[in-house]
Amino acid sequence: MVASGVERELGRAVAEGGVPGILAEVRDGEGRWFGSAGVGDTETGRERGEQDRFRIGSITKTFVATVVLQLVAEHGLSLGDSVEKWLPGMVLGNGHDGGRITVRQLLDNTSGIFSYTEDYPALQSRDTFTPQQLVEIAMAHPAPFEPGTGWGYSSTNYILAGMVIERVTGGALADEISRRITEPLGLAGTYLPHGDDAKIAEPHSQHYTNLYLPDPDAEIYDATELDPSPYWAAGSMISTAGELNEFFGALLGGRILPDEQQRAMFTTVPTRGWVPGTRYGLGVSSLELPCGTTVWGMGGAVLGSWSYAYGSRDGSRMVAVNINADWAQGGWDDPIGIFTDVLDAEFRPDASREARSAS
């Protein structure tokens, strides 16, 4: 198959958006297509490859939510359990009260817990963090709203969810994700780094950052080697485009979770101050595209890497995209605009389907 509309958008992202490189994989009933534009390494000019690994940022949250829901299905815990039950004394102070916050509220971002990622000076104060230290950063700030009365995207929620998983299972989060998800699905290129392992397993593209500075002439840094400890359960996983499509295809298609937990995951609430056109479930989001089609999945960003993986509600049609940078120019405010154009090109109902040939 040839996804000509997606291919055009990849070219635009490099030519007009100024990104170093972009790749995408499309899957549907007709087969699988991979394409890329730009480079994976600006020094050598190496193109981005189909097997290239990259940091997937907050798409990590979908894996974490999936493990939590599997534990719920096994009666290891309940979505109605309080955070205090599993992590006594961890969420306390400045309006935070773990006794009034449920596991469900962690997963759908209705907990009212401050996101530690908003305290940039604290994150720059040391090289390596433990999950508890990340939560302590959040507890030093006032809670934005009462539990269950609003919505706010908070990475602290998923640090806590990762800690709950480890408390329930007695195992490391990385091992639980591997045992329960990546190994059964055969996702050999997808993993949560252990500890402060800053490297990405080969093969991989280089990751480039301008430190989110708006100046188009801002200095560019190589962020390929990055301590994952400040992100952990909220955003430190590594994967490939093909394996993201495999995972989300199975998840959306109901092949990972039992029916009850599947319904819980895809029961959504409105978002506020996040990506326009979205609703949020338990570690997943729905996104209404400009063409009117609604797709399901998750996006993620970390220094030097932005990713999207979205598809049809039944998982039969998937698109995974990655940019090995954290900026966009030429009229796009950030890579989200590029991703929206890529998805719209593939999921637009009235899009003319050009001839597709076997890849």
Image (cartoon, helix red, strand yellow):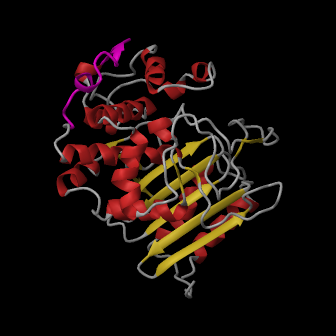
Q: Does the magenta segment cover residue 86?
A: yes
The N terminus: image quadrant: bottom right
Residue 18 shows up from this direction: yes
**Point 51% across, 70% down: residue:** 26
Q: Position of residue 33 (x, y in %)?
A: 55, 75
The answer to whether 291 appears left or right of 68 in the picture is right
- Indicate left or right for 82 with 173 as reference: left
**Between 352 and 130, the one nearer to me in the picture:** 130
Image x and y of residue 167, in percent = 30, 31
Tell me if 85 is positioned left or right of 349 in this view. Answer: left
- Of residues 251 and 295, the one nearer the viewer is 251
Q: Is residue 202 magenta?
A: no
Give, as a single range, the part of the protein colored magenta: 79-97
**What residue appears at the point 47 percent right and 72 percent down from the top-left corner?**
27
- Residue 84 picture quarter: top left
Asked which quadrant contains residue 29, the reply is bottom left
Question: Which residue shows up at 56% across the image and 44% down it?
Answer: 301
Any part of residue 291 in sight: no
Q: Residue drawn 19% across and 57% down? A: 259
Q: Going by the image, does 97 lie left or right of 129?
A: left
Q: Quadrant of the C terminus?
A: bottom right
Marks counted in the figure total 0
| Residue 24 drawn at (x, y percent) | 58, 65
